[in-house]
C-alpha cells in the first residue's frame, strides 16, 4: 500500500512514505501505534500541487491632485465628477458634471483612475465670470509636456502629452475621449475658441491627450 | 469577409477539429506504444544535434491555399489587422516554445511545435493573399519560414552549447530581419520606412533570442517575463505593420475605441491561453520552469481582472478575479493530478470546472445586461477548458502533434470569443459614459482665449 502526502512544511519537496506489508521480520509483532514495517520511498510532490492563483485585486489609489509644471499649475484636491442626471442650463442629461468652483478640476469617477487601463478624464474650467480658471493655460500645452497626477496614497503617475486638439463642441469626439479601451491614458478637457455671447458658451473644447510614462 | 461568415467558418472548423481530435486520440495508442522509438530518436538527436535536418516551417508552397486559418475572403481593415496581430502573437509564443523545446534537446516536441509554426506561417500567408494578392503572400511566406529556421538553428546551437552554430544562426537571422523589413516597407506604399520596419522586426527577434538565452541559463522567471513582453510587442508591431499595409482611410479604423478594446481583449485572452498551456504542460511533467510559468499566468490574471475592473467596477473586477482564480487553480490542479497519477482527482476537477463555467457565464451575462447569453457562453468556456485539458493529456502522452493541434485551435477559438466579449463589453460600458462636450467656460477671459 502506498500513502501519499505526508507534507513537510517549508520543504521544497515533500516526502511520501510508502508502507508495505513486506519486509517485517518473521514472527515479530509491531509496537502499538507504530507501523509494523515500512519502507520509505521518496516521492517528490509536484510543484503544481502548491500553486495558488493570485486573488488580491490590484487597485490603483484615487487621484488627489494634478500638477503641470509647463503651465505652472498645481490644482487643489480633485473633485469627483459623475454624469449629469438632472439636466440644467449648460449641462444636458448624460453630459459630464462640471467642477463647482473655477479653481477646481475634477476627475470623472465613472472611468478609470489615472494609471489604470483605459482613458482617465480630468476636466476644468478655462475661465469664470471675470477671471481665469484652473485650466486657463491648458491651451498652451504641447506634445512632450509632462503631467503628474498625485494619488491619495502618496504615489504619483507621470503622463506625457501626445496631442492637443481644439474641437468644435458640435463635433465633440465622445468616443475618442470616453470610450473604453485598455491602454492607460489621460485626457484633460476645458473650453476654447470663440465665445458665443448668445449661447453664453465657448464654441470649442480643448482636449489634451497624454500617455503614462513607465 | 463578414463576421457571420467567419463565425460559420469557425463553427465548421470546430466540428472538423472535434473529429480530428477523436481520430488523433484513437491513433494516440499507437503513438504511445511507439514511445521507445521516439525516445531513441530523441536520444539520437541529443547526441548528434548537428545532424538534424533544418525545419521546414511552411507546410505549403502556395499560401493562397494553405492552412485552415484564417478563412479566405476580404476582411474589414480592422479584422485584417486583428487577425494579423493575433497570428503574430501566436507565432511569437510558438517560436519561443519551439526554441525552448530545442534547448531542452527535446526534438519530438521541437518538431511538433515547428509544424504548428508552419501552420501559423501559412495562415499569415493566406491572410496576406486574401488582402493583397497571392504574389504578396508568395513573397512573404518563404521569408518568414527562413526567419523561423534561423531561430530554430539558434536554439539548436544554444541547446548543444555550439557557439559557432549560434553565431552563424545570428548572422542568418539578422540578414532575414533586413529582408523582412524591406518586404514590409516595400508593401506599405511609403507609409513605413525600412528603418521603422527594421526596428519592429529586430525587437521581435531580440525578444525571442533573449528569452531563449534566459531559458537556457535556467532563469525561467526572466525568460517568461521576456516571453510576455514578446507577445505584447507582437500585438503592437502587428498594429503598426497592419496599419501601414492598409490605406490611410482604412488605417483610421484602428484608432476607433471599439477596435482598440477588441484588440486589447484579444491580446489578454490570447495570452491567457498560451500561458496556461505552458503552465499546464510544465505542471503535468513537473518541469523546473513550472513556477515561473505559473507566475506568468498570475500576471495575466491580474491584468484581466484589472480590465474587468475598469470596464465595470472595482467590485466586479475583484469578483471576476476570484472566479478566474478558481478556474486557473482547477486547471493547475488537473496538471498536478496528472503529475501524481491521480486519476480520481482528474475526474473530480473536470466537474469543478463545469461549476466555474456556469458561474462566470452568469456573471458576465449579468454584467452586460444579457448581451452575452449565459448558456452559450458557458458552452464556449466548457469547450475552452476541455481543449486545455485535451492538449495537456496529449502532451504527457508525448503525442505532441495532437497537443499542438489542439493548442492551436484553442487559441483560435479564443480569438472568436474575445470578439464577442469585446462587443458586449463595449456596448454595455458606453451606456454609462458621458456624452458630448463640456461647458467649461463663462467667457470672462473670452477676448484673450478667442483671440488666440
Image: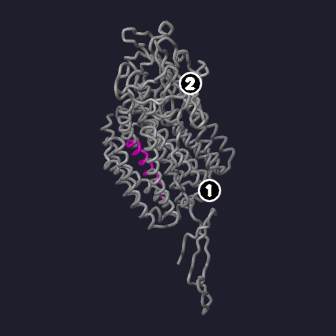
Q: Residue at x 63, y 62 (%)?
A: A12
**Is B293 in front, or is A214?**
A214
Rate crowding at label 2 as few (under 14), some (14 to 19) or many (20 or more) other CA atoms within 10 Å: some
Residue B292 in the image, given as x and y percentages of width and height: 58, 51
Q: Main secondary structure of the magenta part?
A: helix
Q: Nearer the viewer, mark 1 or mark 2?
A: 2
Q: Which residue is tagged 2?
A: A75
Q: Is residue B301 magenta?
A: no
Q: Classify B422 as above or below A93.
A: below
Question: Relative to A61, does residue B47 appear above or below in the rendering?
Answer: below
Give the image location of residue A204, x and y in percent: 43, 15
The question of residue B408 being in magenta is answered with: yes
In the orientation shown, which residue stands out farthest toward the bottom? A27
> Which chain is mark 1 on?
B
Residue B179 in view, yes or no: no
Pinpoint residue B307: horizontal percent, then vertical percent: 46, 40
Q: Which residue is mark 1?
A: B46
Q: Which residues are magenta?
A: B399-417
Amino acid at each position: 500500500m502506498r500513502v501519499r502526502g505526508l507534507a513537510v512544511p517549508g520543504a521544497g519537496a515533500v516526502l511520501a512514505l510508502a508502507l508495505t506489508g513486506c519486509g517485517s521480520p518473521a514472527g515479530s509483532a509491531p509496537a502499538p501505534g507504530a507501523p509494523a514495517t515500512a519502507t520509505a520511498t521518496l516521492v517528490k510532490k509536484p510543484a503544481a500541487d502548491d500553486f495558488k492563483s493570485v486573488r488580491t485585486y490590484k487597485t490603483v489609489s484615487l487621484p488627489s491632485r494634478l500638477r503641470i509644471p509647463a503651465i505652472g499649475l498645481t490644482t487643489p484636491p480633485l473633485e469627483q465628477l459623475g454624469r449629469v442626471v438632472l439636466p440644467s442650463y449648460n449641462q444636458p442629461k448624460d453630459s459630464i458634471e462640471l467642477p463647482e468652483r473655477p479653481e477646481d478640476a475634477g476627475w470623472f469617477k465613472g472611468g478609470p483612475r489615472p494609471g489604470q487601463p483605459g482613458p482617465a478624464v480630468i476636466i476644468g474650467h478655462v475661465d469664470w465670470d471675470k477671471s481665469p480658471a484652473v485650466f486657463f493655460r491648458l491651451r498652451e500645452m504641447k506634445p512632450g509636456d509632462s503631467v503628474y497626477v498625485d494619488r491619495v496614497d502618496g504615489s504619483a503617475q507621470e503622463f506625457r502629452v501626445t496631442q492637443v486638439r481644439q474641437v468644435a463642441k458640435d463635433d465633440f469626439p465622445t468616443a475618442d475621449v470616453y470610450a473604453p479601451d485598455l491602454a492607460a491614458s489621460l485626457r484633460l478637457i476645458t473650453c476654447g475658441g470663440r465665445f458665443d455671447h448668445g449661447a453664453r458658451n465657448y464654441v470649442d473644447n480643448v482636449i489634451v491627450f497624454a500617455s503614462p510614462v513607465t | 469577409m463578414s463576421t457571420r461568415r467567419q463565425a460559420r467558418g469557425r463553427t465548421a472548423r470546430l466540428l472538423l477539429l472535434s473529429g480530428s481530435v477523436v481520430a488523433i486520440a484513437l491513433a494516440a495508442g499507437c503513438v504511445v506504444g511507439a514511445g521507445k522509438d521516439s525516445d531513441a530518436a530523441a536520444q539520437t538527436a541529443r547526441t548528434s544535434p548537428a545532424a538534424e535536418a533544418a525545419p521546414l516551417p511552411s507546410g505549403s508552397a502556395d499560401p493562397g491555399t494553405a492552412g485552415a486559418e484564417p478563412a479566405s475572403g476580404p476582411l474589414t481593415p480592422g479584422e485584417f489587422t486583428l487577425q494579423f496581430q493575433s497570428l503574430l502573437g501566436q507565432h511569437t509564443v510558438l517560436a519561443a516554445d519551439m526554441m525552448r523545446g530545442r534547448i531542452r534537446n527535446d526534438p519530438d516536441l521541437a518538431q511538433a511545435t515547428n509544424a504548428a509554426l508552419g501552420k501559423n506561417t501559412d495562415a499569415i500567408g493566406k491572410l496576406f493573399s486574401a488582402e493583397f494578392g497571392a504574389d504578396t503572400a508568395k513573397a512573404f511566406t518563404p521569408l518568414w519560414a527562413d526567419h523561423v529556421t534561423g531561430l530554430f538553428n539558434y536554439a539548436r546551437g544554444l541547446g548543444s552549447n555550439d557557439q559557432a552554430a549560434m553565431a552563424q544562426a545570428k548572422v542568418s537571422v539578422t540578414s532575414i530581419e533586413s529582408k523582412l523589413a524591406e518586404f514590409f516597407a516595400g508593401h506599405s506604399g511609403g507609409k513605413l520606412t525600412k528603418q521603422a520596419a527594421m526596428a519592429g522586426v529586430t525587437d521581435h527577434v531580440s525578444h525571442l533570442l533573449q528569452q531563449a538565452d534566459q531559458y537556457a541559463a535556467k532563469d525561467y522567471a526572466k525568460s517568461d517575463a521576456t516571453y510576455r513582453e514578446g507577445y505584447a510587442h507582437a500585438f503592437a508591431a502587428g498594429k503598426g505593420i497592419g496599419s501601414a499595409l492598409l490605406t490611410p482611410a482604412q488605417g483610421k479604423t484602428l484608432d476607433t475605441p471599439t477596435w482598440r478594446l477588441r484588440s486589447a481583449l484579444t491580446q489578454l485572452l490570447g495570452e491567457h491561453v498560451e500561458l496556461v498551456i505552458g503552465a499546464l504542460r510544465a505542471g503535468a511533467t513537473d518541469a523546473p520552469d513550472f513556477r515561473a510559468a505559473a507566475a506568468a499566468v498570475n500576471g495575466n490574471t491580474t491584468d484581466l481582472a484589472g480590465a474587468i475592473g475598469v470596464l465595470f467596477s472595482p467590485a466586479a473586477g475583484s469578483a471576476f478575479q476570484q472566479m478566474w482564480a478558481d478556474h486557473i487553480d482547477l486547471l493547475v490542479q488537473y496538471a498536478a493530478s496528472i503529475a501524481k497519477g491521480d486519476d480520481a482527482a482528474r475526474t473530480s476537477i473536470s466537474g469543478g470546472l463545469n461549476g466555474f463555467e456556469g458561474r462566470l457565464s452568469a456573471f458576465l451575462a449579468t454584467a452586460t445586461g444579457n448581451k452575452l447569453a449565459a448558456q452559450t457562453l458557458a458552452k464556449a468556456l466548457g469547450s475552452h477548458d476541455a481543449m486545455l485539458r485535451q492538449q495537456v493529456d496529449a502532451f504527457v502522452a508525448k503525442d505532441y502533434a495532437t497537443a499542438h493541434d489542439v493548442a492551436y485551435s484553442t487559441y483560435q477559438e479564443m480569438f472568436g470569443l474575445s470578439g464577442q466579449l469585446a462587443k458586449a463589453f463595449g456596448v454595455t460600458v458606453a451606456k454609462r459614459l458621458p456624452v458630448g462636450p463640456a461647458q467649461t467656460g463663462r467667457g470672462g477671459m473670452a477676448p484673450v482665449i478667442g483671440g488666440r
